[in-house]
């Protein structure tokens, strides 16, 4: 899977990463479907073994499908981590608000 290299000054926000990851998932799912469609007639029981190169094409398509599945799995992990980080950030904001409220309520003690 190709890696996008950015200049050091330019960093992607969490939302940009999520949107990019979702776009990559769509592309990989389309590619997976195309590979499966290409592979299906090659592995069908009625497929001719006499066709030259069919076994090599099967091997290459399966290898490519494995890489596509790996990419999809990695993308799902990125989305899950992003969701988790969003939940953690939300909890941190709630905690900060509670601390501010408690400080305000207890200022008369100082």
Image (cartoon, helix red, strand yellow):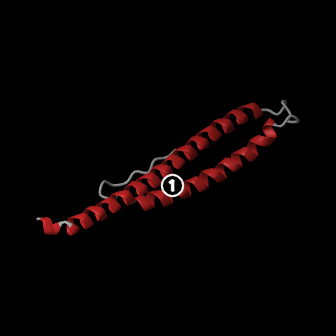
Whole-percent x and y of residue 72? 57, 46
Residue positioned most to the right: 46
Q: Residue at x 83, y 37 (%)?
A: 44
> Is 110 rendered above or below residue 27?
below
Residue positioned most to the left: 110
| Quarter of the figure that contains the C terminus | bottom left
Left or right relative to 52: residue 13:
left
**Where is residue 54, by image quadrant?**
top right
Whole-percent x and y of residue 70? 57, 41
Whole-percent x and y of residue 46? 88, 36
Q: Residue at x 30, y 63 (%)?
A: 98
- The answer to whether residue 12 of the structure is visible from this angle is no
Dot 1 alpha-carbon crowd within 10 angstroms: few under 14, some 14 to 19, many 20 or more: some
Out of 41 and 87, give the one closest to the viewer: 87
Read off the residue under disc 1: 21
Q: Secondary structure at mark 1?
A: helix
**Where is residue 45, by image quadrant?**
top right
Q: How many discs appear? A: 1
Left or right relative to 95: residue 83:
right
Q: Residue at x 41, y 58 (%)?
A: 14
- The answer to whether residue 49 of the structure is visible from this angle is yes
> Is 45 rendered above or below residue 108?
above
Left or right relative to 14: residue 53:
right
């Amino acid at each position: 899977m190709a890696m996008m290299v950015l200049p050091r000054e330019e960093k992607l926000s969490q939302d940009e990463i999520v949107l990019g990851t979702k776009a990559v998932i769509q592309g990989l799912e389309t590619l997976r479907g195309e590979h499966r469609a290409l592979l299906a007639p090659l592995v069908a029981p009625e497929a001719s073994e006499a066709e030259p190169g069919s076994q090599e094409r099967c091997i290459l398509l399966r290898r490519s499908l494995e890489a596509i599945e790996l990419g999809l799995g990695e993308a799902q992990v990125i989305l899950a981590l992003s969701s988790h980080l969003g939940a953690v950030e939300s909890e941190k904001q709630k905690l900060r608000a509670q601390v501010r409220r408690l400080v305000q309520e207890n200022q008369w003690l100082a």
